């Protein structure tokens, strides 16, 4: 029961705090630009405003465009409930299986891309196609890295993997560390921040699939996209850097775990913010070159894993 | 001919005149010099294409613009003035003039042989109702497609300026060019409103996947009718202030170019100090314009941090403009005969300090821009402008210099203050022909501009008056005024009428010469590069579109294409063109 409450709290807080993460990123971006910039709560205001607006869809679009935003945000809530955050174990172990996680990430991407094509807009369609290609390019690295971690730990459950790492009983540690590096880079690309925001590239595609959304649909995406980023970051720390999280349900343990989790998230947020403000967008036709590099790291991890070191 | 053997030997352009006479016996009907540097050859209308092709390709000419003129009230003819900038041997600004029948208005189109003339000739067709035989492109350029057939705004007898013609058609009938071979393409409409362009222009990209196979564009949504306004409502000296409103960035260069046309045609001597001040202010204008474009290059590649920082240091350049002219924009400084405001010694000292700071900032920021991850890959090999295309179409400014041609009016035809320092300056060129080349040219030039301002101010700024107002205006004289604006060469042509007004004023903004090559720069790139390529010519929409007299925008918004474009943008079905 207590686990279920934790899961529920995680899901709700994720929805409530995701706009804060994107708000902080906006604020930081403004500071780097030497602009005054909006406050860190600006995204809440934007979302409140959008929720009051009408939900407009183009008349050629089908149901796909309408169900995409709730589906996207729903998948992220489910992932958020199962992901070990303050705790080392998963509140709902069934939801923290890496096979399920990967599919739960692929499903909203598929619908996101589809909605872009469905909207009938030339730019949104192009953005949708890009989103699918990005998925094809980066998912193999993501999966291979997780696969190596799973073999090294002997389990496919994110929480159990974290426990193994915390206890120091991973079988091939070098392979595991390399897989961690590959996973981190793959996660960053998956987050869709610059220089990899190809599907929504503002100057090229005018926000891609997002440009055909409005009102509550757009508000949901404004929450769901940073949620995805937080979920990915959480998964990374849950598997590869679980240190400090609560190993049991004691109040003290949970309190410390929560603080440690927040610190880790802030550190990751700062790193991503710095990266995204110091780069130009990758030229679309060269994205494949860079994802191959990530894949090579993942393969390297796999080779070490086979060798057992 | 033997009798008057070489009566003009030694004058600039005389060798060209001789060569034309020898090559085309009997074609030349008159030769004169409108100013020392500007020979005018009058040829009969049928031989004009041959003469111009010869001068253009075989004698190193480039064509900035052709000015059409309705001279029926004067000599009962239409006249065309093809302006050629002779840049290899015997440098001069040469005009080939031909006279057309006042009724038929037919001419042999030069664009069939020299593509650089194509926009000017299309414009002459639109605005004067002339008919070009074999013209390269027969579509409307300036006038909207639903414009009444027989209404040509710049004819002297066209209409009352308060008159607004009704639209005649409700369907779009502009044929977009599409040379896609056997590729299966779909259409990506870009604009009239697009996130990266601040002014309306409609691009139609024919893409296969993300690859652009071909592209075409329609512009002139925002005509302001400046030329007609100048002829009908302003005195010749007021046009100066209208000219600088052509552009919000490089307005000062337009003002100088117009002032030069009058000063040269009338033989008005501009005091040396005023010439220096004009050059200094043009360089200040180049500073803030190039910094703007460097920022935009960052923006188009997704590097917004660089964009914002270029705008931060650009503010110092604007301060410099404010210091020297009293306003952030260098407006209202020029009048015929000189300038209105002197540069004081205290301002000189402050200018040096500001430039030192600006130079450090610019160098540092340019280094950072070029070392930003992915930046080079974004700009290298993108938007290639082949030298052959460049030679055919006479683009200007960093666009042509980025393709290896050393065209820069400041050093090729030195004018104003530049003529005193031209011996130790030369144009910057890059050979890479891509966006990177154009960007690097701008980086070089922005630093060079600072040196020029310092050089002109330091110990050379001559003492003396800044204005010459002792002159008389003689009607009927014309001349070319040219200068190097940040985006390339601005060329103005004007003829003064007999009522203190300009009889005809033709203003060519730099970007006017650069649009026609854009189509070739698009080909083979991807959609993601389209905005960057447009940005790399540093386009000026409203500057290009200064002609014609009707508020087309309102008409269009109410009636014509907006709905169709919107509908088409959403559905990609029932294209107004393709179906």
Image: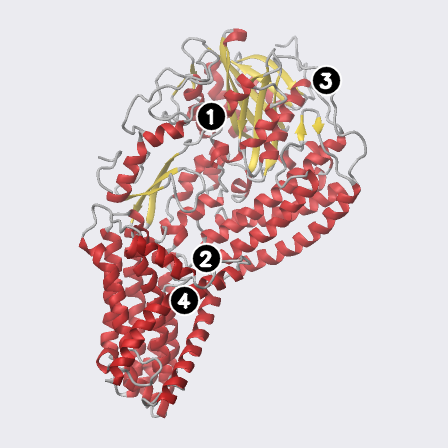
* Image height of A120 relative to B332, above or below: below
* Image height of B223 relative to B358, above or below: above
For disc 1, the chain is B
Question: Can see residue B400?
Answer: yes
> What residue is drawn where x is 64% and y is 26%?
B259
**Label 1 – label 3 distance at C-alpha:** 33 Å
Q: Which mark is residue B377?
A: 2
Circle 3 packing at 10 Å, graded few (<14), some (14-19), many (20+), is few
Circle 1 packing at 10 Å, graded few (<14), some (14-19), many (20+), is many
Secondary element under disc 4, as helix, strand or loop, is helix
> Which one is in front in this view, the residue at disc 2 or the one at disc 4?
4
Residue matched to label 1: B120
> What residue is drawn where x is 26% and y is 44%?
B570
Are both tags, 1 and 3, on one chain?
yes
**Label 1 – label 2 distance at C-alpha:** 36 Å
> Which one is in front in this view, the residue at disc 1 or the one at disc 3?
3
Instruction: Please say if the residues under marks 4 and 3 sit with CB atoms less than 8 Å apart.
Output: no
Q: Position of residue B547 (x, y in %)?
A: 48, 26
Q: Report the colour scheme.
A: secondary structure
């Amino acid at each position: 029961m207590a686990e279920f409450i934790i899961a529920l709290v995680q899901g709700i807080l994720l929805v409530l705090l995701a706009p804060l993460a994107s708000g902080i990123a906006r604020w930081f971006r403004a500071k780097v630009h030497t602009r005054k910039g909006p406050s860190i709560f600006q995204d809440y205001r934007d979302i409140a405003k959008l929720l009051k607006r009408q939900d407009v869809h183009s008349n050629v679009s089908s149901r796909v465009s309408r169900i995409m935003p709730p589906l996207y945000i729903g998948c992220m809530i489910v992932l958020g409930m199962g992901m070990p955050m303050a705790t080392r174990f998963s509140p709902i172990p069934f939801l923290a299986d890496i096979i399920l996680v990967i599919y739960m990430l692929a499903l909203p991407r598929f619908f996101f891309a589809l909605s872009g094509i469905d909207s009938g807009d030339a730019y949104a369609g192009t953005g949708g196609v890009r989103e699918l290609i990005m998925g094809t390019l980066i998912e193999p690295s993501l999966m291979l890295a997780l696969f190596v971690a799973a073999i090294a730990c002997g389990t496919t459950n994110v929480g159990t993997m974290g426990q193994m790492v915390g206890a120091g009983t991973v079988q091939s540690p070098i392979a595991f560390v390399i897989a961690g590096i590959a996973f981190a880079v793959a996660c960053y690309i998956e987050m869709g921040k610059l220089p990899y925001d190809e599907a929504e590239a503002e100057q090229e595609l005018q926000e891609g699939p997002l440009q055909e959304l409005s009102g509550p649909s757009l508000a949901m995406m404004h929450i769901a996209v940073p949620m995805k980023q937080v979920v990915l970051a959480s998964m990374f720390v849950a598997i590869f850097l679980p240190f400090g999280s609560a190993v049991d349900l004691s109040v003290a343990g949970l309190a410390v775990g929560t603080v440690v989790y927040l610190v880790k998230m802030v550190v990751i947020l700062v790193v991503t913010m710095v990266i995204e403000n110091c780069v130009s967008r990758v030229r679309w036709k060269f994205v494949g070159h860079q994802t191959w590099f990530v894949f090579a790291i993942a393969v390297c991890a796999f080779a070490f894993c086979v060798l057992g070191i | 001919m033997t009798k008057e053997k070489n009566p003009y030997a030694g004058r600039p352009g005389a060798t060209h005149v001789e060569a034309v006479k020898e090559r085309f016996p009997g074609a030349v009907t008159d030769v004169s010099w409108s100013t020392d540097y500007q020979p005018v050859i009058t040829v009969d209308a049928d031989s004009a294409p041959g003469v111009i092709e010869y001068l253009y390709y075989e004698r190193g000419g480039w064509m900035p613009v052709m000015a059409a003129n309705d001279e029926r009230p004067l000599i009962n003819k239409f006249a065309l003035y093809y302006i050629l900038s002779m840049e290899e041997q015997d440098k001069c600004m040469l005009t080939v003039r031909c006279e057309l029948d006042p009724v038929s208005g037919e001419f042999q189109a030069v664009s069939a042989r020299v593509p650089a003339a194509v926009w000017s000739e299309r414009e002459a067709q639109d605005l004067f109702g002339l008919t070009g035989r074999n013209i390269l492109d027969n579509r409307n350029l300036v006038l909207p497609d639903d414009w009444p057939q027989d209404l040509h705004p710049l004819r002297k007898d066209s209409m009352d300026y308060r008159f607004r013609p009704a639209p005649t058609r409700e369907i779009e009938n502009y044929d977009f060019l599409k040379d896609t071979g056997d590729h299966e393409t779909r259409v990506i409409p870009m604009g009239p409103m697009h996130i990266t362009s601040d002014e309306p222009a409609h691009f139609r990209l024919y893409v296969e996947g993300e690859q652009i196979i071909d592209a075409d564009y329609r512009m002139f949504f925002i005509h302001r009718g400046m030329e007609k306004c100048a002829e009908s409502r302003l005195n010749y000296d007021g046009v100066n202030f209208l000219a600088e409103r052509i552009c919000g960035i490089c307005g000062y260069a337009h003002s100088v170019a117009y002032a030069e046309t009058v000063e040269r045609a009338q033989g008005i001597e501009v005091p040396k100090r005023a010439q220096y001040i004009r050059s200094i202010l043009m360089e200040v204008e180049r500073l803030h314009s190039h910094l703007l474009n460097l920022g935009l290059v960052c923006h188009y590649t997704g590097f917004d941090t660089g964009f914002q920082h270029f705008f931060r240091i650009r503010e110092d350049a604007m301060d410099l403009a404010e210091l020297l002219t009293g306003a952030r924009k260098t407006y209202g400084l020029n009048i015929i005969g000189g300038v209105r405001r002197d540069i004081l010694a205290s301002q000189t000292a402050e200018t040096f300090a500001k430039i030192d700071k600006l130079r450090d900032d610019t160098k540092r920021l340019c280094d950072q821009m070029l070392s930003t991850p992915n930046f080079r890959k974004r700009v290298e090999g993108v938007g290639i402008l082949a030298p052959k295309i460049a030679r055919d179409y006479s683009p200007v400014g960093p666009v042509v210099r980025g393709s290896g041609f050393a065209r820069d009016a400041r050093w090729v035809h030195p004018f104003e203050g530049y003529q005193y320092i031209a011996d130790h300056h030369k144009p910057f060129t890059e050979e890479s022909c891509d966006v990177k080349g154009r960007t690097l040219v701008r980086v070089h030039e922005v630093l060079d501009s600072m040196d020029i301002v310092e050089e002109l101010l330091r110990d050379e700024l001559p003492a003396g008056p800044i204005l010459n107002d002792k002159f008389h205006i003689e009607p009927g004289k014309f001349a070319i005024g040219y200068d190097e604006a940040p985006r390339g060469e601005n060329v103005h042509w004007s003829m003064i009428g007999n009522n203190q007004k300009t009889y005809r004023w033709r203003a060519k903004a730099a970007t006017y010469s650069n649009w026609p090559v854009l189509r070739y720069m698009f080909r083979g790139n991807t959609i993601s590069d389209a905005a960057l390529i447009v940005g790399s010519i540093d386009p000026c929409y409203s500057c290009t579109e200064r002609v014609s007299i009707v508020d087309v925008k309102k008409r269009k918004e109410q009636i014509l294409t907006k709905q169709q474009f919107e509908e088409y943008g959403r559905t990609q079905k029932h294209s107004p063109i393709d179906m």
